[in-house]
Amino acid sequence: MVKSVQLFEDPKVSLEDLSEFYKVERIPHTYLMFVTTIDGVAVPLEPGQRGGAEIALRHLKENPIAQGGLTDNRALQYGWATADAILGGAGILRDSPEATWYPRDTDLQVLIRKRASKPVRAVVTGTGEIDLNHPVFNPKKDEWQPIIFTTKRGVEKLKAQAKDLAAKGKMPGEHVKTHSLGDINVDIAKAVGILRKDYHANLLDVQGGPILAGEAVKSKLIDEVRLTVSPQVIGDLNSEGKRRPGFVTGLHFGLEDSPLSSLEAIGVSGSHILLRYYVTYRS
């Protein structure tokens, strides 16, 4: 049964309303946060389009239908500000050169600064093909602890990159902590276990993309899906005929063992719908 139905009239939702809507009663708690079109697409898969902003319609500055996209962004930033740790895929860093999962809204930045412990920004890369110069690995004022989860091969790749940068007189990513969790692929369950045990990440925000999100669901690590439905139909193929993904890819369940979800809360902002689903695994 739905516990909460809330109308967000102002896209700049107050902290009080956000904390009430996204209240978490049990910890540890891990959630996915995505925005999709009505027809379930999460990534436009077009050059120069990162995904979330275009799917949420935030690029339509003058269109009133796009107002709910601002609410979605506010909710997204609230998730960044309140999570003990954020776990994201390396693809997000390649697509978003400035992505740090650090809120832009001043009141949410204040929320982070009031925390008793430093939040974590963790990146998953099986190959180690990430840029140590990326700002997520180089917080300017020590605002967060950067972490890399990778494989044995990835560790060697990162060491080679660091050595090359040092030879050029550069020392990016000095405070990054690296964990090797597999020979070929990163063991996501072990990564989450380390975040919970070693970094006290009771509230974990999994930012995906869809491959990482799929692995997390497959490993039964996700307790909640926070899903915004954006009022557009984009179609399942991009301009090159490639299939556009939903918010999870790379997994299969049958009708008998697929995870089920109970609807916890509904938020309405203009033509956008914000949903909170608690996930139940049947096997």
Image (spheres, grey):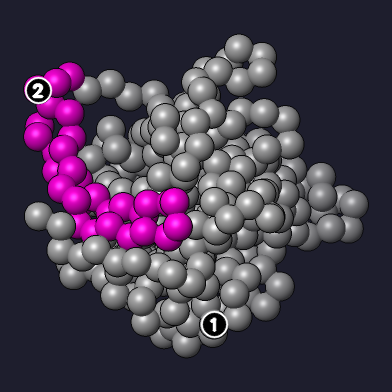
Disc marking residue 187: none
Percent x, y for residue 164? Answer: 81, 45
Q: Is residue 9 above or below residue 258?
A: below
At 28% from the left edge and 21% from the top edge, which residue is drawn? 252
Q: Is residue 8 above or below residue 185?
A: below
Residue 178 in sight in this render: no
* Amino acid type at mark 1: Asp
Q: Which residue is mark 2?
A: 256
Q: Which residue is mark 1?
A: 107
User: Which amino acid type is marked by label 2?
Assistant: Glu
> Which residue, as the protein is rendered here, is positioned at the far right?
168
Residue at image position (36%, 54%) is 274
User: What is the C-alpha distance between the residues marked 1 and 2?
Assistant: 45 Å
Q: Determine the secondary structure under disc 2.
A: loop
Q: Quadrant of the N terminus?
A: bottom left
Q: Magenta residues, as a range?
A: 254-283
Q: Examine the residues drawn in magenta and state their main secondary structure.
A: strand
Callout 1: few (<14), some (14-19), or many (20+) C-alpha neighbours within 10 Å?
A: some
Q: Is residue 230 magenta?
A: no
Q: Are marks 1 and 2 in contact (CB under 8 Å)?
A: no
Q: Quadrant of the C terminus?
A: top left
Residue shown at 63% from the left, 52% from the top: 63
Question: Can residue 241 be seen in this snapshot?
Answer: yes
Q: Does the magenta run of residues contain 261?
A: yes
- 140 with respect to 209 (left or right): right
Q: Residue furthest top?
A: 241
